[in-house]
Amino acid sequence: MAAVLSILQHSTCPENVSFHFLSVHLDPEIISLIKSTFPYLNFKMYQFDPDRVRGKISKSIRQALDQPLNYARIYMSDILPKNVKRVIYLDSDIIVVDDIAKLWKVHLGGKVLAAPEYCHANFTNYFTDTFWSDVNLARTFEGRRPCYFNTGVMVVDIDAWRKGGFTQKVEEWMAVQKNKRIYHLGSLPPVLLVFAGDIKAVDHRWNQHGLGGDNLEGRCRGLHPGPISLLHWSGKGKPWLRLDSRRPCTVDYLGPFHDLYRSSRVALEE
């Protein structure tokens, strides 16, 4: 709800924004809540069948990353209607503080997806020694300069994804993972294996990620230097949980999370 509100608040033309919600359950109460909160919102909700990835998911370093819905982004080309040619995929733990149309207008230059790249990150850390010691596997990135990118914020040419059969390509890496344990982090690494070094890079301002804290202990993290268009609470700590437990980080007060939390508390107390 906070993510949707932030997008609408900062859009020059909010009436032009269409939302496609992916959910495991098509809960009538949730749909009703969205309609009552945003009466004029242009949206559709789609069910993601967990059986689609059952048996394909390998255990990761965080249990939250093993949830089937984390893999729904891989199947957007199958879930969304054929007339949807392009989308901005966003995780739910984000706040937008800029006009989302700016991100929408990014020129893909023939690439399937666009996202902020982080080439200073040690890319080898995202895969196990088993991967790098296997000559055939390590050749995966030949001819590419692979950089880390966060799959929680992506502009995706859905039509090109469909035509290129990229869902199957990601699934093939998931199958390798089941046999050889070549990575640790859920749905992110198989996408990196397919696309890293072959995406359209966009400004880092569109994904200030890691605000959920470090992955092991969830300790607070501050903002990265530079301009900000999108805040992303990736990591272990989520602002709604930290606010509810009365142990928020400073960054949790930056978005509508706190305002929505306060209003819900008032409604409950009344």
Image (spheres, rainbow, N blue to C red):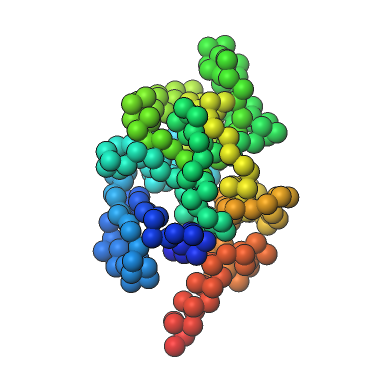
Q: Tell me what residue is drawn at x 59 percent, y 47 percent.
A: 207
Relative horizontal placement of residue 47, taking residue 60 as reference (left or right): left
250 w.r.t. 23: above or below: below
Asked whether 155 or 174 is in front, the reply is: 155
Residue positioned most to the top: 135
* Quadrant of res 82: top left
User: Which residue is nearer to you in this view: 137 or 94?
Assistant: 94
Which residue is farthest right? 225
Q: Is residue 33 visible?
A: no
Residue drawn 29% across the image and 37% down it: 78
In this rendering, the count of numbered labels is 0
**Residue located 57% across and 58% down the image:** 97
Whole-percent x and y of residue 181? 51, 27
Quadrant of the drawing holding the N terminus: bottom left
Q: Could you tell me residue 119's position as x and y percent?
A: 66, 32
The residue sitting at 37% across, 36% down in the picture is 158
The extreme front residue here reads 12
| Residue in the foreground of this view, choosing between 257 and 97 | 97
Q: Position of residue 157 (x, y in %)?
A: 41, 35
